Image (cartoon, rainbow, N blue to C red):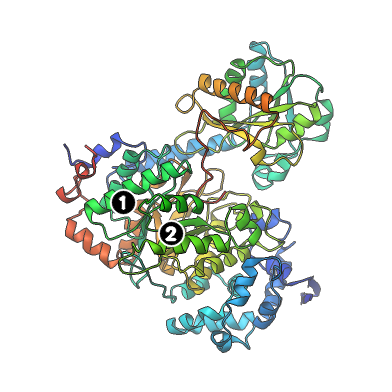
Amino acid sequence: MAFRHTLSGTAYVFDDIATLLARATPFRSGDALAGLAAGSAAERVAAQMALADLPLTTILDNPVIPYETDEVTRLIQDSHDQAAFAPIASLTVGALREFLLMADSAALTALRPGLTPEIVAAVSKIMRLQDLIAVAAKCRVVTRFRNTIGLPGRLSVRLQPNHPTDDPLGVAASTLDGLLLGAGDAVIGVNPATDNVDATCTLLTMLDAVRERYAIPTQTCVLAHVTTTLRAIERGAPVDLVFQSIAGTQAANDSFGVSLALLREARDAALSLRRGTIGDNAMYFETGQGSALSANAHHGVDQQTVEARAYAVARAFAPLLVNTVVGFIGPEYLYDGKQIARAGLEDHFCGKLLGLPMGVDVCYTNHAEADQDDMDSLLTLLGAAGVTYIMGVPGADDIMLSYQSTSFHDALYLRDLMRLRPAPEFEAWLNRMGIDSAAGQFPPTLSPALIGLG
Amino acid sequence: MTNAVSMLRRFTAARVALGRAGNGLPTQAHLAFQAAHAAARDAVHAPLDTAALQAAFSAIGIDSVVTHSLAPDRRTYLLRPDLGRRLRDSDRDALPSGLGEVVFVVCDGLSAVAVQRHAAPLIAAMARSAAPVVIAEQGRVALGDDIGAAMGAAAVAVLIGERPGLTAADSMGVYLTWHPAIGRTDAERNCISNIRPEGLPIAAAAAKLTWLITAMQHMRLTGVALKDEQDSTPAQSALLN
């Protein structure tokens, strides 16, 4: 099925929906690397115009990756809810954009099961940043494990206390720094330097002891591969959340060593531990544009559409947290601060619209054309868009993964500027503990000696 | 026992206990970060001084030859990984062949500074090969496959500048590949990373590489099947690989 559009006397032809979506995508280096980007600015707008005229039913009826060969497509098609889709069933992509801009929060919530990743990716391609922010800000997604994430007027922070050799004392020191600065209500989550069961169990035990010692109403996580975490559960390690990086095609997930069946098994194992006190959202997923192309598993689909498909995988497992690691992958996928900012807001919009508790790792590597000013811009825009959580890394410098994310200070800035508060249970804990981050001293309740730092 | 926040610095090199000015960083901490980022950025964009590198090899009695990938400049290199993995045709034709079991390739990678400082000392600490060291500009790890195949090498060791972090801008990695050929995957290589004086020092890196080469020659392969028994398996990044 080919699509045509004539702009200023030039006729453009797009062979299929995947091509149309790719050509309509605002420019980014990864689509150029894949040979999928529009050849000119005019071709891009022509594609956007053709996309705006496309009926949503045409997208539903023509999966970008075949049903027969991809379990993510099967998940998307089989879980699509026709009743929820009914209010928009007669619309085009262009009309959906206007519908979303006019809809209230309740309508957006009701619409979720009727939306597919390809539909939300399509509409995002004809939206400006302002549109992406305005619609995302109306989405309400609330999840629970030991506290409540995503309430209106709240901003949570993942405390990310990574250490290059997984030294438990080093991780504990960064954790205390973050707690003192009000971070950690989304999760206290460590990326292990070494993905093995022993190291993972050591960190899990330490983090759980810290949480128990200070009675923090939050959850902990070691972001090891799901198979490592399953083995840690078998060994009796205190696993709150099961983490996994996921992508939007079966082949890309294969390259990550995961499948839907494995994720199902992992969620069942986490739930069997019954560690959530007020809810059972027990999964934590990370994603990022470009990962499928990086694994040569994108099937000719543009990187933003593939990314949105990863959210279909995520939402099948009722996660507590999902975040895109938007600037981590490097300049061959997102070249500079402008591309990173657009991608971060697209990912947040698509995730929220599909019903995910969407956070963003606002970040960059040193070979990208980006710096702290770019991060401040995206951070502030995401605050306006109602981002569920951001990362908190000591001084924004992750000394294990060698990239720059947001800092505990950045989170304080955003909360103060936008009048946002931590998760209610965590906020009450901060008050109860007498934590005053402006002081140069730990309060006695948060004494480092209590966890063996002295 | 102390409750002063500054005590945290004893336990980690992370930027803890920075203090606050309002919600922002104190000026000194803010500018210290900017300085570290500037060093990393400059390292990414610094050109490889091939003449100086050749002189360094010459001084220890090692011949070298300078080559270039298909990526003409740094911007293209960053945007087109595929071009950084292939050698210019004219350079391929000029390479000697049939010399030596293990060919050493020195690539700028993402930090020319790293190989400028550490490549010659590391190779000097290794057993001598008859083949010249191949210096490659705008090169990625897999460029070694193209070079090694052209030279008919049994194996190739690519010394390459790693992506600079804020902690270090001069970290070097080594990738060892048995029977180099275009299309080899990273799963078919063994890697030693973080080579620099404050990380894995040259002498320790040379010992590790010597161990790997010996094991490789014994098993006639590299990659996941060749376990580095001196170390645990490096983590797949828990983020995106």
The answer to whether A122 is drawn above or below residue B238 in the figure is: below
Q: Residue at x 64, y 51 (%)?
A: A294
Q: Secondary structure at mark 2?
A: helix
Q: Position of residue A199 (x, y in %)?
A: 42, 42
| Neighbour tally class for label 1: few under 14, some 14-19, many 20 plus, Cα within 10 Å | many
| For residue A123, side relative to residue A61 (left or right) | left
Calculate the distance from the C-alpha at mark 2 to the C-alpha at mark 1: 30 Å
Q: Residue at x 83, y 34 (%)?
A: B89
The answer to whether B106 is drawn above or below residue A215 in the figure is: above
- Label 2 amino acid? Leu
For the N terminus of chain A, the quadrant is bottom right
Q: Position of residue A22 (x, y in %)?
A: 69, 65
Classify residue A27 by image quadrant: bottom right
For the C terminus of chain A, the quadrant is top left
- Label 1 amino acid? Asp
Q: Position of residue B178 (x, y in %)?
A: 70, 31
Instruction: Identify residue for label 2.
Output: A379
Q: Position of residue A16 (x, y in %)?
A: 76, 71
| For residue A91, side relative to residue B87 (left or right) | left
Question: Which chain is mark 2 on?
Answer: A
Towards the viewer: A137 or B32: A137
Asked if one can make out residue B105 in the rendered structure from this viewpoint, the answer is: no
Asked if one can make out residue A349 in the rendered structure from this viewpoint, the answer is: yes
* Mark 2 vs 1, N-terminal side: 1
For marks 2 and 1, give the one nearer the viewer: 1
Mark number for residue A224?
none
Instruction: Identify residue for label 1.
Output: A208
Q: Secondary structure at mark 1?
A: helix
The answer to whether B160 is drawn above or below residue A410 in the figure is: above
Classify residue B105 by image quadrant: top right
